[in-house]
């Protein structure tokens, strides 16, 4: 079993050269540790990428990365909220086990426990040079310390550097180009395609960071609202189409940043020896996705380009969590895992995309903004999903960027009783358990939790969910007994 192989043997066998993974021609470099570049977009739905089947959104550079890497078709964020998800990505621990229960900025002010060990700190200790550019949105800085902070990464601002991917690459150029015997870790995080602040602009679609004067080094790609693809969970209305067109434009901008970053790695001679990871923190910023544990909120794009093109052009249906990224990257870097993490290394999948044992993921949401308390936990298998709404007497709260979206506001003003496939009442008022058969109900609409015919399935998933909460030291575990 891969999990039993010592970490330092893993990097020699997997990162750069053993013929088992990367081919015999790379044996001479087997003692060289790989560079790591992590590209994290913001609120990017998995299906809104050409490599994942979109025929509308133009993402040639992310598509090229997928052709040269391994595409994960069943990757899931551990939560659908920015700061908690990013903390999980960078620590390998669920948000309820880091203290980053909600957003970091402004009045929410959530923060990770001081004793948590993050990926950049672990890599730095192991001899990596580390730097970040773009959006940050986690705290405290001491826990997520990088050698170099190439930009401060103010969240959700149209003027933020994180909206300008070409300039982000320029900021990273000196760091990537530095001649050093040490490998590097670059955290490259865009604000795109997050909705733009201010969120409340009446009946006009949110700009998603798009500007009339554009951004330096970017050729803006605009979209005809009549030709966008409306996901099934959204209503097909002019307001939704207008916002999707803006969202697509923001995606195309970040895609050009990916292209420039890859070009920089090639120009500096680092491309062959670099692990490139493309992912997002959570799903699309529309009601029914972001801040929920429904699939549109947590199903994430994940593409990994391995050194020397290992597994190029392949896809895997292994069910992995973004909580698995830190343990996986540490494995690939030959760094001992140290303190226990909630995620687990999926190096076995990188060796064999059909590797067994990857058939369930878990979700954990507690807050978004500080006033948005709505704790949920979930387990998802290939067929079933159970969502446990821990305080079902509460009305489901709206994130500000979704509440003031013209797509939701105009739906409300029209007096509509539904939003996409789900009724407004079902969206706002949820039972303690939601059980869905994803095989026959991929939209997660027909709740089977009270159906006696599915009692055994429900009981089994509850048992497994409790075990997950115990294993990950979830403070909300006690709510099963003291509700």
Image: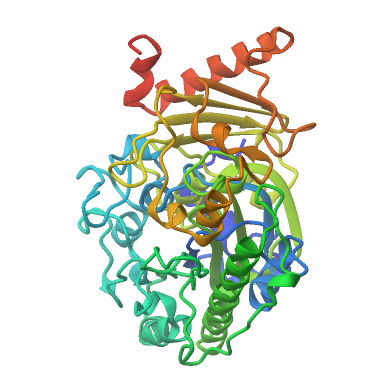
Report whether 190 appears left or right of 253: left
Residue 290, position as x, y percentages in the image: 50, 49
Residue 482, position as x, y percentages in the image: 33, 11
Estimate the x, y position of residue 163 in percent, counting from the top left: 43, 77
Work out whether residue 360 or residue 70 is closer to the camera in this orientation and state it: 360
Task: Check the image and tell me how it is coloured.
Answer: rainbow
Quadrant location of the N terminus? Answer: top right
Q: Is residue 240 left or right of residue 204?
A: right
Residue at the image point whose x is 50% and y is 55% from the top: 409
Q: Position of residue 480 (x, y in %)?
A: 40, 13
Would you say 11 lies left or right of 471 here? right
User: Is residue 192 shown to the viewer in this render?
Assistant: yes
Marker count (numbered): 0
Residue 230 or 471: which is nearer the viewer? 230
Q: Decide: is 334 above or below 179.
A: above
Residue occupying the point 37% across, 36% down: 366
Do we see residue 21 in this rendering? no
């Amino acid at each position: 079993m891969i999990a039993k192989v010592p970490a330092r043997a893993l990097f020699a066998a997997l990162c750069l050269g053993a013929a088992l993974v990367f081919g015999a021609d790379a044996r001479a470099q087997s003692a060289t540790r790989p560079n790591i570049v992590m590209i994290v977009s913001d609120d990017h739905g998995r299906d809104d990428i050409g490599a994942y089947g979109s025929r509308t959104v133009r993402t040639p550079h992310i598509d090229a990365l997928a052709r040269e890497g391994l595409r994960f078709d069943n990757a899931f964020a551990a939560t659908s909220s920015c700061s908690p998800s990013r903390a999980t990505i960078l620590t390998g621990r669920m948000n309820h086990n880091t203290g980053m229960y909600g957003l970091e900025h402004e009045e929410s002010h959530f923060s990770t426990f001081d004793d948590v060990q993050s990926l950049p700190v672990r890599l730095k200790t192991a001899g990596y040079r580390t730097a970040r550019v773009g959006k940050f949105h986690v705290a405290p800085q001491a826990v997520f310390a990088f050698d170099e902070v190439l930009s401060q990464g103010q969240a959700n601002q149209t003027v933020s550097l994180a909206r300008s991917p070409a300039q982000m690459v320029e900021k990273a150029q000196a760091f990537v180009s530095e001649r050093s015997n040490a490998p590097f870790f670059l955290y490259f995080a865009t604000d795109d395609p997050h909705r733009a602040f201010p969120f409340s602009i009446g009946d006009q679609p949110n700009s998603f960071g798009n500007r009339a004067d554009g951004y330096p080094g970017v050729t803006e790609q605009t979209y005809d609202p009549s030709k966008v693809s409306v996901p099934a969970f959204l209503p097909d209305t002019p307001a939704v189409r207008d916002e999707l067109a803006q969202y697509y434009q923001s995606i195309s901008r970040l895609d050009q940043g990916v292209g420039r970053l890859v070009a920089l790695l090639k120009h500096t001679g680092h491309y062959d020896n670099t692990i490139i990871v493309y992912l997002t923190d959570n799903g699309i910023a529309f009601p029914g996705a972001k801040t929920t544990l429904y699939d549109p909120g947590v199903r994430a794009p994940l593409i990994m380009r391995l050194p020397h093109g290992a597994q190029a052009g392949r896809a895997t249906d292994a069910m992995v969590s973004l909580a698995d990224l830190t343990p996986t990257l540490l494995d690939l870097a030959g760094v001992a895992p140290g303190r226990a993490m909630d995620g687990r290394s999926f190096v076995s999948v990188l060796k064999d995309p059909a590797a067994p044992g990857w058939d369930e993921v878990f979700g954990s949401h507690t807050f978004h903004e500080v006033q948005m308390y709505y704790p949920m936990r979930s387990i998802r298998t290939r067929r079933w999903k159970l969502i446990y709404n821990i305080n079902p007497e509460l009305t489901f709260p709206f994130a500000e960027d979704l509440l003031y979206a013209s797509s939701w506001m105009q739906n409300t003003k029209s007096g509509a009783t539904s939003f996409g496939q789900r009724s407004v009442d079902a969206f706002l008022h949820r039972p303690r358990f939601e059980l869905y058969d994803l095989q026959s109900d991929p939209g997660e609409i027909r709740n089977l939790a009270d159906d006696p015919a599915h009692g055994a399935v429900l009981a089994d998933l509850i048992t497994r969910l409790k075990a997950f909460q115990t294993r990950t030291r979830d403070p909300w575990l006690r709510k099963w007994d003291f509700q």
